[in-house]
Image: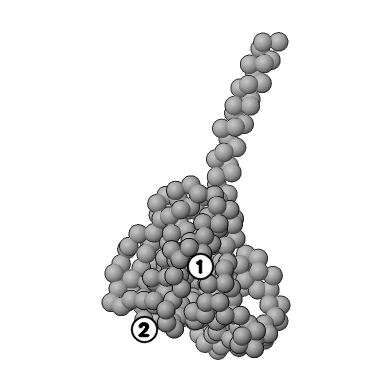
Amino acid sequence: MKIKLVLALITISLIGVSAAPCQATKTMIEQMPAKLETQFALSALPPALRDQTVYLLDPKKGYHLSRQGTSGVTCLVQRTVWELADFRNDIYFPLCYDAVGTKTYLKVIMDAAALRAQGMSPVALKAEIANRYKNKTYKVPEKAGLSYMVAPVKRTVGPPDMKVHTMPMPHLMFYAPNITNEDIGAVPNLSVHSSLLYPFTDKQGIAEQSYMIQLIGEAEKAKILADEKTLLDDLCAYRDILCLPSMKH
């Protein structure tokens, strides 16, 4: 009887030890190679604008300055979408903010990464970000501005069902805190692509963090995909979830 009890305790112990790493693997962010992450982040900008500041992610600490640019524009690859209240390891969202966005919306993204690295749960993180907007720790942009997101690929939530997809969706996002589709007369239908070709708003987690979205036209989108073929190949080789559907065999 004692032997059976000891064996049972050992079994439980081994299950406990092995289960934790397995669970952690599902949400643990893998650090990208620095060169690839830099190129991916800067691909959010038109080629002529890419002499900019870049932050790279250390999953154990948060973002750190890797490259100082010549203007107020800052680029990174977002890996935590705080508004989902769900930590995943397969989010890849290259974006660049102008000077006013760097001080406001980009700060939220960087803080979210740091808080995640410190061990905050996804539900607690979402509540913390919302509270910081409520108590004015986070400010909204004081003037017009935009975030460049013209990269050839991203993996995050998106149309038609707002689930996580790998997709080519180059676009621009203009700051529009507390603005709704009704305010601008937009009637987007996420399942009908043609309805998204004109500006519409997207409330990302909270009303203060709303944007007007303008998709890049199909001809320019095709050019971006062609021009960035090497990057697309490198990303696909790095991790198959970053392969566009057309690249899979």
- Residue 53: in sight, yes or no? yes
Residue at figure coordinates x 71%, y 77% from the top left: 191
SS at circle 2: helix
Which scheme is used to colour this image of the protein? one colour
- Residue 14 position (above or below residue 27): above
Residue sitting nearer the eye, 40 or 64: 64
Specify whether 124 is left or right of 2: left
Specify whether 1 is left or right of 233: right
Give the percent coordinates (x, y) of residue 30.
47, 53
Give the percent coordinates (x, y) of residue 29.
49, 53
Which residue is disc 1 drawn over? Answer: 93
Residue at figure coordinates x 43%, y 55% from the top left: 114
Residue at figure coordinates x 65%, y 65% from the top left: 163
Q: Amino acid at mark 2?
A: Ala
Image-quadrant location for residue 178: bottom right
Which numbered dot is residue 31? none
